[in-house]
Image (cartoon, rainbow, N blue to C red):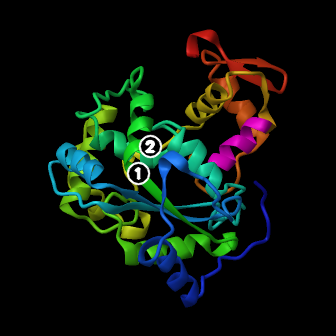
Amino acid sequence: MTMVNARLTACADQDVLVAVESLQVRPHIMPASSWPGEEVGIQEAGLYSWWVDEAGAADLAEGLELPVAAGRIYAGQAGATRWPSGTRSSATLVGRIRSQHLGGNIYGSTFRLTLASSLAKSLALTGTGDKRLAAGGEKRLSAWIQEHLSVAVHPYPNRDASENLEHRVLEQLDPPLNLRGMDPSPLRERLKGARKSLLGVVPTSHQHQGDHDAEPPAARQDDSDKVTLHAEIADILREHGNPWMTTQEIADGVNERDRYRKRDGSAVTAFQIHGRTRNYGHIFDRQGSQVRLLEAAL
């Protein structure tokens, strides 16, 4: 991920029409069990939408105790330039869907966290208190995704305009399980509570009033979405099998995953990884510019 002299770009009205066509009107929906198949353009940035079958919708409805219809339930993007910093992302559709949604964990995928929170009872999922599922939970969640979900993609290589495109498309699609930036609804309020319950988050009196009371829709974000840099570093090391990794490799991984964001929106640097791992010596083992997890932290 690199910093460039990019400028915030608005997508064209036609881009929105084409994206909605791809993700909702006439989507090419592929079952999760056979994805990516022969999908084209997935090495690009772009948008995606997730769809659930009748049985899966019934499972979600049972967990949230509110109706959930079969069909499109969630949408998002991969690879958008970060604003206002103009930091370019190297994320792709194939990376986001395969590595984070289909084969990831609830720490690295907000979508998986949403599903796990909704399916906690039916799949016997419990949180461990560190945004993780207890043993076997991720495997059961992945199996459910493979059985009940399908995905449609819309490649969109204009990374500078991708954030604007996502915002405008989500306004039209209004996916029922999207939270960030969306208007409140009974189902979303129930989902927020389910996520906090799974993660062991006790709402404060301020949180109980609802995020939408404190911030405009575009700025809304659940407390459960906050990611610390040291936790993100640890997750990257675990994901790779805990080899020695250089601070630059880790910084590149943090920026590509796009989960942790600095307040100014700029890219995480190797120097920042160096400082954070030094400050958390009870978690990380270090040799010069190389880092790995201590055995106790695995």
> Is the residue under label 2 in contact with that under label 1 (CB below 8 Å)?
yes
Residues at marks 1 and 2, CA–CA distance in whole angstroms: 6 Å
Q: Nearer the viewer, residue 86 or 191?
A: 191
Q: Residue placed at 67% from the left, 64% from the top?
A: 40
Q: Is residue 128 visible to us here?
A: yes
Residue 265 lies in quadrant: bottom right
Which image quarter is the N terminus in? bottom right
Q: Main secondary structure of the magenta part?
A: helix
* Of 239 and 58, the residue lying toward us: 58
Magenta residues, start to end: 249-257
- Is residue 264 part of the magenta span, yes or no? no
Location of residue 212 in the rendering, given as x and y in whole percent from the top left corner: 29, 63
Name the spot of residue 52 as percent of width and height, x first.
Answer: 35, 55
Please name the residue that numbered disc 2 is placed on.
146
Residue holding disc 1:
149
Identity of the residue drawn at 60% across and 43% down? 99
Residue located 28% across and 43% down the image: 118
Q: In the orientation shown, which residue stands out farthest toward the left?
A: 65
- Element assignment for label 2: helix
Q: Specify the amino acid type for callout 1.
A: Leu
Q: Three-letter amino acid code at disc 2?
A: Gln
- Count neighbours of disc 1 (C-alpha within 10 A) and say few if under 14, some if 14 to 19, many if 20 or more: many
**Furthest residue toward bottom:** 13
Q: Is residue 221 left or right of residue 12?
A: left
Q: SS of the residue at dot 1?
A: strand
Up/down of 50 relative to 162, above or below: above
